[in-house]
Amino acid sequence: PDDSEEDKHIHKCNITERYEDEEYSEDEEEESDHEYLYTAELEVQKPFGDTGDVIVERHEIEMIPREAIEFVNLHYTSDVFLKNSFRHEMKLPDEIFPKAWMNKEQ
């Protein structure tokens, strides 16, 4: 399957360390506005040639602000896919909708 442009910049990683930013200050005119920084081990898969093979590169990146980390569910793993998740038919009376919205012929 083709990955969207946005997915190409999302990589599996492990956060290995969280530490206080020594330059952090709540004063807006100071150096850093990040209270904590993170270190992550990152795994990047790059296509190699026309055979569908991939090259796996591993990197360690330091001083990552929290705003740069995004948590993403794996496909079909969020709670909406649970077999016992709550589902109930919603019954709304037609009278609450404007007549212009109603396209059902009676």
Image (tube, rainbow, N blue to C red):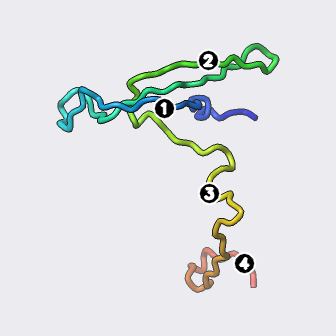
Tell me which residue sits at (46%, 36%) in the image: 69
Q: Are dots 2 and 1 in contact, CB under 8 Å?
A: no
Q: Earlier in the sequence, mark 2 or mark 4?
A: 2
Q: Amino acid at mark 3?
A: Asp
Task: Give residue 2's position: percent from left, percent from top.
Answer: 72, 33
Which corner quadrant of the image does residue 99 belong to? bottom right
Instruction: Report the residue at 66% width, 70% height from top.
Output: 87
Q: Which one is in front, 29 or 98?
A: 29
Residue 54 in the image, given as x and y percentages of width and height: 72, 19
The disc, 2 or 1, on the residue closer to the chain's N-terminal end is: 1
Dot 3 or dot 2, earlier in sequence? 2
Callout 4, which amino acid? Lys
Q: CA distance from mark 4 to mark 1?
A: 54 Å
Cα–Cα gap, marks 4 and 3: 34 Å
- Please name the residue shown 62% across and 83% down the image: 94
Judged by depth in the image, the label closer to the viewer, 2 or 1, is 1
Q: Nearer the viewer, mark 3 or mark 1?
A: 1
Q: Nearer the viewer, mark 4 or mark 3?
A: 3
Quarter placement of the C terminus:
bottom right
Identify which residue, 3 or 59, lies in the foreground. 59
Give me the C-alpha separation between circle 3 and circle 2.
Answer: 32 Å
Q: State yes or no: discs 2 and 4 in contact (Cβ < 8 Å).
A: no
Mark 3 lies on residue: 79
The residue singled out by tag 2 in the image is 57
Q: Callout 2: 10 Å neighbours few (<14), some, many (20+)?
A: few
**Among the two numbered marks 3 and 1 on one chain, the one whose residue lies closer to the N terminus:** 1
Mark 2 and mark 1: span between their CA atoms?
A: 17 Å
Query: Tag 3: Cα neighbours inside 10 Å, few (<14), some, or many (≥20)?
Result: few
Q: Is residue 88 above or below residue 41?
A: below
- Sequence-wise, the earlier of marks 4 and 3 is 3
